Amino acid sequence: MKNLFITVALTLFLGLSTASAQEIDIGFGLGTVSAPTSSAESVYSPGSQGGGIYPGLSGDFLLKKTVGVQGEIFWRGSQGLYNGYQPYRPVFWDFSGIWLPHLAKHVTGELVAGIGVESIRFYTNYYNCSYITGCTNYTSSNHFMGDFGGGIRFYPIGNFFVRPEARLYLIHNNVEFNSNHATRYGVTIGYSFR
């Protein structure tokens, strides 16, 4: 089911982008996530969601000269330990509106706002198998989220760009951690098809 969804999404993305887009951008990024730490003194205190290296992929297409839509996925590269014993990995998916104002000859701003899902995968020592989804060794806790952020694209060589960026994730009902928000900071290297 997941593979079917990804295939349909990519087909729609490529079809729509080639039909009406003025520009298509793709990128690969690395960053980290910071979130507030707990100040509570108790036996059970939800931990912070921060830390770790987050690789990710992003892509957008512009419907007008500076306005379009963008999607991205960033995940924690290595498993963390939830409360010191349970391996876990957060994954952030989002789809946003994007505005790219021209700032200078080889510099473009980037502002995004949208919605998405935080999927927290808690890993186990056994596999759950299903005919539709296959076999996995984790259970997921999914949370709706809002996404706000921005970056600055520098074009040092042709259509290649480097983008320092920051994203604020407002996560609904994030009961596994002590905060309902997290901030991702990072850098993406990409290419613009114009």
Image (cartoon, rainbow, N blue to C red):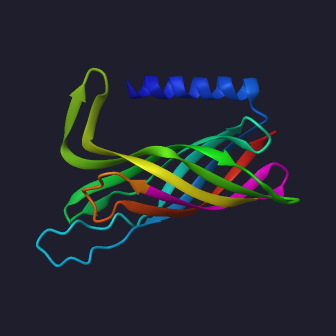
Q: Residue 26 or 115: which is nearer the viewer?
A: 115
The answer to whether any part of residue 76 appears in the image is: no
Q: Is residue 99 left or right of residue 157?
A: left
The answer to whether any part of residue 123 appears in the image is: yes
Rendered position, 14 above or below 190: above
| Residue at the image point whose x is 79% and y is 35% from the top | 22
Rendered position, 134 above or below 92: above
Q: Is residue 55 left or right of residue 39?
A: right
| Residue at the image point whose x is 27% and y is 20% from the top | 131
Task: Pinpoint residue 103: horizontal percent, then vertical percent.
Answer: 81, 60
- Of the 4 image quadrants, the one containing the N terminus is top left
- Of the 4 image quadrants, the one containing the C terminus is top right
Q: Is residue 129 left or right of residue 172?
A: left
Q: Which quadrant of the figure has residue 23?
A: top right
Q: Is residue 159 magenta?
A: yes
Rendered position, 5 above or below 159: above
Q: Which quadrant of the figure has residue 144?
A: top left
As drawn, the residue found furthest toward the right would be 105
- Name the dominant secondary structure of the magenta segment: strand
Q: Is residue 82 magenta?
A: no
Q: How many marks?
A: 0
Q: Residue 107 or 113: which is nearer the viewer?
A: 113
Q: From which residue to which does the magenta span run?
A: 154-169
| Residue at the image point whose x is 85% and y is 51% from the top | 158
Q: Residue 37 or 53: which is nearer the viewer?
A: 37
Task: Pinpoint residue 115: horizontal percent, then vertical percent.
Answer: 48, 44
